[in-house]
Image (spheres, rainbow, N blue to C red):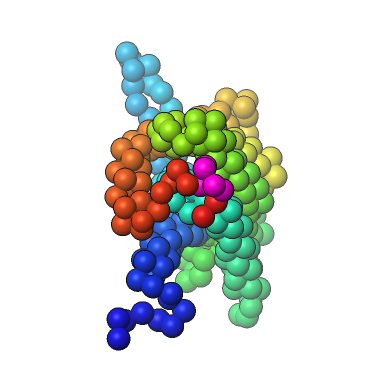
């Protein structure tokens, strides 16, 4: 009569699960885009300061990535550390799922004619785009998964460390304090592993490698850090209204353990 499914104990329970589904969907969707787009293109955001050019090359796959940290912060604040960690592990399995189908799609018939020099079909071939994305994604999968798991678990752990340390106060500190560290961990890991393990970065082999890698690391980190600072206000507003809408007291987790 009230429109609830039999597994939904009440309107409040349904509301809480639907909000969690939206946050989890944004998280997992952003992770999927990151994995597929990855390093398929680098955007040049270089700028000048007092006549000095500051290089900033950003992988297109990084664009949706900061949303994942905002989603886990919301889930950590409203639903607790255990559920946030569970979502991180689901995201890891999703990475494996995506890679599995990219692999299967590449080995099923018909067998493409590959260029020995590039390992890819001719650029005019219909399936060139698929094999190019597959090459870049498969090449960077180890970097993506290791960096993702390390950074996300780091983010969730530090978020709750600051929450316990401040006894639930200073929302801005745990939002930014966790993300600042975890974003650097992610940026450093994904760039170094992508280069040294997969060799999938567009670097100049004749030039020193570390200055080039630091440009990629710094560019990604500055972008992620900027978004993290900008989303502080939306995070405050979101927690304020969602805690009322869901009838969840974020302080209860600190006082009595996770909900």
Is 256 colored magenta in this rendering? yes
Q: How many marks?
A: 0
Is the N terminus in the top left, top right, bottom left or bottom right quadrant?
bottom left
Q: Residue at x 38, y 30 (%)?
A: 46
Q: Is residue 155 visible?
A: no
Q: As displayed, is residue 65 above or below residue 49?
A: below
Q: Residue at x 33, y 17 (%)?
A: 49
User: Where residue 236 sits: x, y (%)?
Assistant: 33, 40
Nearer to the camera, 153 or 164: 164
Q: Locate residue 57 relative to residue 157 in the image: left or right.
A: left
Q: At x 58% / y 32%, what residue is drawn?
A: 213
- Who is closer to the viewer here, 112 or 26? 26
Relative depth, front residue between 217 and 183: 183
Task: Choose top left, top right, bottom left or bottom right for residue 156.
Answer: top right
Q: Position of residue 82 (x, y in %)?
A: 58, 53
Q: Most extreme residue toward the bottom, as rendered?
A: 1
* Left or right: where 26 falls relative to 241: right
Side of 176 relative to 88 (left or right)? left
- Residue 259 location (% of width, % of height): 51, 55
Furthest residue toward front = 256
Residue plotted at (54% across, 47% down): 256
- Quick check: can you spot residue 98? yes
The boundaries of the magenta stretch are 253-257
Magenta stretch encompasses residue 1:
no
**Which residue is at the far right?**
197
Quarter where residue 12 is shown: bottom left
Q: Where residue 214 sits in the image (x, y, percent)?
A: 56, 28
Name the magenta segment's main secondary structure: helix
Relative height, residue 57 to residue 41 (above, below): above
Q: Is residue 230 above or below residue 12?
A: above
């Amino acid at each position: 009569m009230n429109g609830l499914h039999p597994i939904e104990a009440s309107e409040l329970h349904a509301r809480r699960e639907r909000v969690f589904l939206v946050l989890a969907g944004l998280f997992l969707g952003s992770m999927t885009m990151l994995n597929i787009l990855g390093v398929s293109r680098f955007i040049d955001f270089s700028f000048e300061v007092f006549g000095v050019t500051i290089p900033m090359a950003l992988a297109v796959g990084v664009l949706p990535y900061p949303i994942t940290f905002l989603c886990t912060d919301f889930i950590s604040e409203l639903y607790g550390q255990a559920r946030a960690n569970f979502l991180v592990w689901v995201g890891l399995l999703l990475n494996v799922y995506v890679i599995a189908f990219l692999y299967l799609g590449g080995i099923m018939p018909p067998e493409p004619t590959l260029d020995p020099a590039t390992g890819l079909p001719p650029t005019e071939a219909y399936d060139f785009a698929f094999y190019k994305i597959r090459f870049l994604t498969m090449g960077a999968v180890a970097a993506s998964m290791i960096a993702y798991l390390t950074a996300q678990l780091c983010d969730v752990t530090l978020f709750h460390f600051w929450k316990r340390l401040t006894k639930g106060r200073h929302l801005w500190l745990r939002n930014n304090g966790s993300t600042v560290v975890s974003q650097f961990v992610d940026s450093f890991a994904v760039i170094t592993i992508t280069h040294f393990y997969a060799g999938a970065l567009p670097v100049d082999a004749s030039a020193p490698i570390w200055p080039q890698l630091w440009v990629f690391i710094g560019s990604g980190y500055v972008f992620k850090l900027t978004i993290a600072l900008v989303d502080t206000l939306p995070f405050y507003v979101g927690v304020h209204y969602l805690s009322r809408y869901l009838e969840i007291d974020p302080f209860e987790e600190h006082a009595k353990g996770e909900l």
